Amino acid sequence: MSTALVDDELWSAIGDPTRRRMLDLLLSDGGGTATTLSQQVSVTRQAVAKHLVVLDRAGLVRATPAGREKRYHVDDAQLARAVAQLAAVGQAWDARLQRIKKIAEAIQRDRQD
């Protein structure tokens, strides 16, 4: 798989454990605000808000006004894109590992002969 097909900003956003936890919470709860998320993760509301900005910039969440706050929802299309990229990366690594295995087996056969 070409690295051009991997969205570094997307994976940088997903790479943080707190942001992954927030995505999980948004998916399971159907959405949330910085306040509701901060009550469920071990960081302050301000830190949650900063994480949400990163997730929003990567397109993983979308905000809608909800009174004085914004309510965030996971963007299903962008999440599906991330899943597809991850699957493609996994397939590329599986192919590499198969090639390495064949080379190792050939070396082993040559040594036995």
Image (cartoon, rainbow, N blue to C red):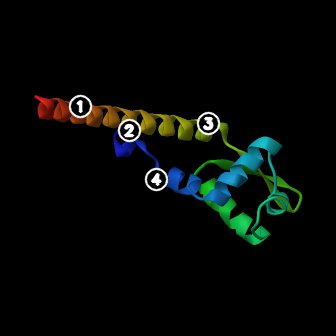
Total number of numbered labels?
A: 4
Regarding residue 30, the answer to whether it shows in the image is no
* Badge 4 amino acid: Asp
Which residue lies at the image location 72% right of the left edge and 54% below the top edge?
22
Q: Position of residue 86 (x, y in %)?
A: 50, 39
Q: Nearer the viewer, mark 4 or mark 2?
A: 2
Q: Position of residue 93 (x, y in %)?
A: 38, 38
Give me the C-alpha separation between circle 4 and circle 2. Answer: 18 Å
Asked whether the residues under the numbered discs 1 and 2 touch, taking CB atoms below 8 Å apart as contact, a structural biologist would say no
Q: Quadrant of the N terminus?
A: top left
Label 4 sits on residue: 8
Which residue lies at the image location 14% right of the left edge and 31% below the top edge?
112
Which residue lies at the image location 69% right of the left edge and 49% below the top edge?
23
Snapshot quadrant of residue 46: bottom right
Which residue lies at the image location 61% right of the left edge and 36% below the top edge?
77
Snapshot quadrant of residue 81: top right
Asked whether the residues under the numbered discs 4 and 3 touch, taking CB atoms below 8 Å apart as contact, a structural biologist would say no
Label 1 sits on residue: 105
Label 3 sits on residue: 77
Label 2 sits on residue: 93
Q: Nearer the viewer, mark 1 or mark 3?
A: 1
Q: Nearer the viewer, mark 4 or mark 1?
A: 1
Q: Quadrant of the C terminus?
A: top left
Image position of 36 (left or right of 20) = right
Q: Nearer the viewer, mark 1 or mark 2?
A: 1
Q: Nearer the viewer, residue 91 or 107?
A: 107
What residue occupies the far front of the structure in this picture? 112
What residue occupies the far left of the structure in this picture? 113
